[in-house]
Amino acid sequence: NAVINMIRAGEVVERPASVVKELIENSIDANATVVRISLRDGGKSLLVVEDDGDGMDCEDVDKCVDRHATSKFSGGEASSLCTYGFRGEALAAIGAVADLTVQTNQAKSAHGWETVVWFGQKFAPRPCSKVSDSGGTRVAVRSIFRKYPARHRMLRSNGHELSAVIHVVKAAALAAPEVTFIVDTGSATKSFVLRAGKSGDRVQDVLGLDYVKNSASLSLARNGMEISGRVSLPGWSGSKTSQSTVIVNNRPVSVGKSIDNALKQAFNGISKHHRPQVVLNITVPAKEVDVNAHAAKREVRFLFPDAIQSLVTDAINQAVGVVPD
Ligand code: ADP
Ligand code: MG
């Protein structure tokens, strides 16, 4: 149903950055080791995410653009641990508002399969050349919102959309240090590569040596919850320029209230004006976190927000040596 697809699309697809976020998550769910992101005009005219993951067969590629197309186990604990968000909505939502092409092949197949959804109109899969000999998927999104002038007008300048995309890629890269990210923005100066390596190296690659030198690592576990990461040292002024990244059960999420409060509280004794810049990896039992609070914004709701808040506060205080009051 086109109208329903369009409404749902509005929740998942706000701008190129939200598309990139969904596509990168799909690539990582498909066990990609390299994800290549190419953009033109900040992703407005063209946005491609290509991976060397498991790929799909003909039947799967036909279904993957339908609503509720998820192949991911839903319900129960396992699903929320490894996969996030509204299930089976992303590709359908993207296809409703853009010119979408999915090309894919599995390792064993002789050729690939391609399916196209053109502003909600779906075409039957047809053979195409392989994306990768070891299996892989290439998703190309062209002319996002072109048929929806009101939505198109909500997009900002190419530069602004590009920075939002880069922010999403960097958060994903911090959450998945074992994956290599290659970003081609169409401009040599803004394109970059993040090679897979140890987690510590990834933080330095994404946030810079200056951040690493001016931050402390943190680590704390209790009541089945675990936190690790880095926090900038009190008074470090570099923290004004960049944002914090919070990763819950391996997925970047937006900094919700309980974590934001914890950050405020942790630095309260030292400086009223400095908000620490953090990279937080939080692991909680799947049933203690609701990731479906909002489709696009990725706000999480914790079953025990106070426990999370004090875990974050204590971990930060430990790391920067502040005595909690
Ligand atoms: P969800 O990720 O919630 O399952 P999506 O609409 O994002 O929903 O994707 C639908 C389905 O398409 C996935 O469940 C998966 O089976 C398949 N798929 C999407 N992207 C990829 C990819 N990069 N590699 C392999 N399979 C993919
Ligand atoms: Mg998905």
Image (cartoon, rainbow, N blue to C red):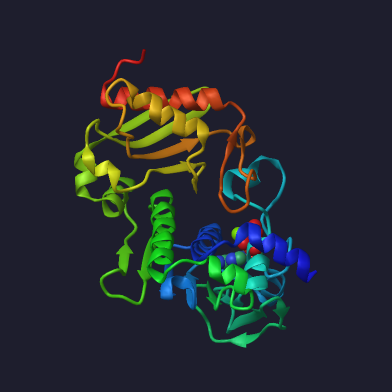
Q: Percent x, y for residue 28?
A: 51, 58
How many numbered badges does the structure rendering display?
A: 0
- Left or right of 220 in this view: 122: right
Q: Please report the residue visible at 71 percent of the width from the left and 83 percent of the height from the top.
A: 123
| The C terminus lies in quadrant | top left
- Please name the residue shown 46% across and 66% down the image: 156
Q: Is residue 140 visible?
A: yes
Question: In the image shown, does 108 or 41 lie closer to the viewer?
Answer: 41
Residue 56 x/y as whole percent: 62, 71
Q: Is residue 216 left or right of residue 160?
A: left
Residue found farthest to the right: 1
In percent of width and height, residue 185 lies at 36, 72
- Nearest the eye: 212 or 29: 212
Q: Is residue 93 above or below residue 317?
A: below
Q: Quadrant of ligand 1?
A: bottom right
Q: Residue 80's spot in the image, x, y percent?
A: 62, 44
Q: Quadrant of the N terminus?
A: bottom right
Question: Is residue 56 at all visible to an observer of this figure?
Answer: no
Could you say which is closer to the camera, residue 131 or residue 43? 43
Image point 51% across, 38% down: which residue? 256
Picture quadrant where residue 75 is located: top right
In the image, taking residue 35 as reference, residue 10 lies left or right, namely: right
